[in-house]
Image: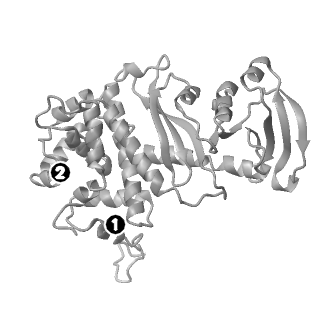
């Protein structure tokens, strides 16, 4: 029961504090720290994410304007711009990376029974990355071209519930194909990938790990046709073939047979060619599964629009990664709250409500359920005319 606590404080009750402290001890985050702890840093950065603060000065001004309310938010240390900047520069970003993975595991467990566009019992993942552009003069450590700087955010998205099961932040100069070296194949799972990840030696690791993949084929792709299977042309499937790789190095990297499916989208009339190691799924189901890969594009679009991961509060690599991992933690935390409270509103609606009500002393569930949709903008009959016509 709420006893005069702020909504922000109630929201932070969903954070497993003992797990957070374990991550802090693992990397000695509070070593030689007397006032502004890692937990204070996390609360300040989470506040900045939820209220869309643009700079350290913005964070400092807003929190100082609250006066004694800052204590009721859970922040015990004195919030100063220089203190928060030093914490972002020096506290190991892996503290928040490990903690984000803990929240991700909790979120995936809550969303494991979510409905999926294609009726399958297997877990379906979408693998992709997005580039976050940076200013080269301010972030010289992130250079990847002569005049460009940036980092890549890699994500393996569980399509049930849109919770990322794996996230990694690498310099943009590292090709996305290298993310394969960080993944541990899950037996029985299906991985959806764009053709940027077409590396037959690495794809063969998924096959050896008893996992399935569906990937777009390139145009300069040579193969031997082993067999052709009957298809229903009215469904959009043009061909379903069993093939072997023809070129020397691809054939050495993937010595087994593959399945090649050609599909034409009825809406866009675009011709798509897929490669997969799954010979049991119907050809149309393979095409429908790949279409679901678009959810990861929507995920990247959402976090770029509604999380502060394009305007950074620090210039060092440690500060940038700290901000990104705390942003991911806030995203997953809101998703956990949505599921545990049984809310029907979207994550966008919940974050917008939280952004203007963090300091209200009402029940969290009450604050998130009193939203009644868009306000009617119908004109009143008593409205006076500005001009006589």
Q: Quadrant of residue 21?
A: top left
Q: Is any atom of residue 292 visible in this view?
A: yes
| Quadrant containing the C terminus in the rendered view | bottom left
| Number of residues whose C-alpha sits closer than 10 Å to that of mark 1, classed few (under 14), some (14–19) or many (20 or more) | many
Q: Nearer the viewer, mark 2 or mark 1?
A: 2
Say which mark, if any, is on residue 368: 1
Q: Quadrant of residue 360?
A: bottom left
Q: Is any atom of residue 328 visible in this view?
A: no
Query: Where 358 sits versus 88, above or below?
Result: below
Q: Where in the figure is residue 87, as x and y percent of width and height? A: 22, 32
What's the distance in space between the residues labelled 2 and 1, CA to CA? Answer: 21 Å
Residue for badge 2: 74
Query: Where 115 sits versus 220, above or below?
Result: below
Query: Which comes before the other along the chain, label 2 or label 1?
Result: 2
- Residue in front for this viewpoint, 124 or 284: 124
- Residue in front for this viewpoint, 66 or 100: 100
Q: Residue placed at 12% from the left, 42% from the top?
A: 77
Q: Residue placed at 41% from the left, 55% from the top?
A: 335
Q: Residue placed at 77% from the left, 48% from the top?
A: 280
| Quadrant containing the N terminus in the rendered view | bottom left
Q: Secondary structure at mark 2?
A: loop
């Amino acid at each position: 029961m709420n006893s005069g606590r702020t909504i922000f404080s109630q929201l932070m009750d969903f954070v497993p504090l003992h797990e957070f402290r374990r991550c802090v001890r693992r990397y000695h985050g509070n070593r030689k720290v007397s006032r502004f702890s890692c937990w204070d840093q996390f609360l300040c950065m989470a506040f900045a994410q939820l209220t869309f603060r643009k700079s350290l000065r913005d964070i400092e001004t807003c929190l100082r304007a609250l006066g004694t309310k800052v204590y009721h938010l859970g922040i015990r240390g004195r919030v100063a711009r220089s203190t928060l900047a030093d914490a972002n520069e020096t506290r190991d970003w892996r503290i928040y990376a490990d903690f984000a993975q803990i929240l991700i595991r909790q979120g995936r467990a809550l969303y494991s029974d979510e409905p999926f566009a294609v009726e399958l019992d297997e877990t379906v993942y979408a693998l992709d990355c997005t580039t976050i552009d940076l200013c080269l003069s301010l972030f010289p450590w992130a250079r990847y071209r002569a005049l460009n700087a940036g980092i890549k955010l890699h994500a393996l998205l569980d399509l049930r519930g849109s919770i990322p099961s794996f996230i990694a932040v690498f310099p943009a100069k590292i090709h996305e194909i290298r993310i394969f070296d960080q993944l541990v194949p899950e037996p029985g799972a299906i991985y959806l990938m764009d053709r940027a990840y077409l590396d037959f030696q690495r794809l063969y690791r998924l096959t050896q790990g008893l996992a399935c993949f569906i990937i777009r084929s390139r145009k300069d792709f040579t193969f031997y046709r082993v067999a052709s299977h009957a298809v229903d042309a009215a469904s959009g499937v043009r061909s379903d073939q069993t093939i072997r790789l023809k070129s020397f190095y691809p054939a050495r990297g993937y010595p087994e047979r593959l399945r090649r499916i050609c599909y034409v989208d009825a809406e866009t009339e675009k011709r798509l060619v897929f490669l997969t190691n799954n010979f049991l799924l119907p050809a149309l189901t393979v095409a429908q599964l790949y279409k679901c890969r678009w959810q990861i594009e929507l995920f990247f679009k959402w976090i770029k629009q509604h999380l502060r991961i394009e305007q950074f509060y620090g210039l060092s690599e440690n500060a940038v990664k700290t901000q990104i991992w705390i942003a991911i933690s806030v995203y997953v935390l809101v998703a956990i709250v949505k599921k545990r409270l049984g809310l029907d509103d979207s994550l966008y609606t919940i974050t917008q409500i939280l952004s203007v009500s963090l300091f209200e002393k009402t029940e969290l569930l009450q604050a998130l359920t009193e939203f009644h949709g868009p306000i009617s903008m119908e004109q009143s009959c008593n409205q006076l005319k500005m001009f006589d016509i």
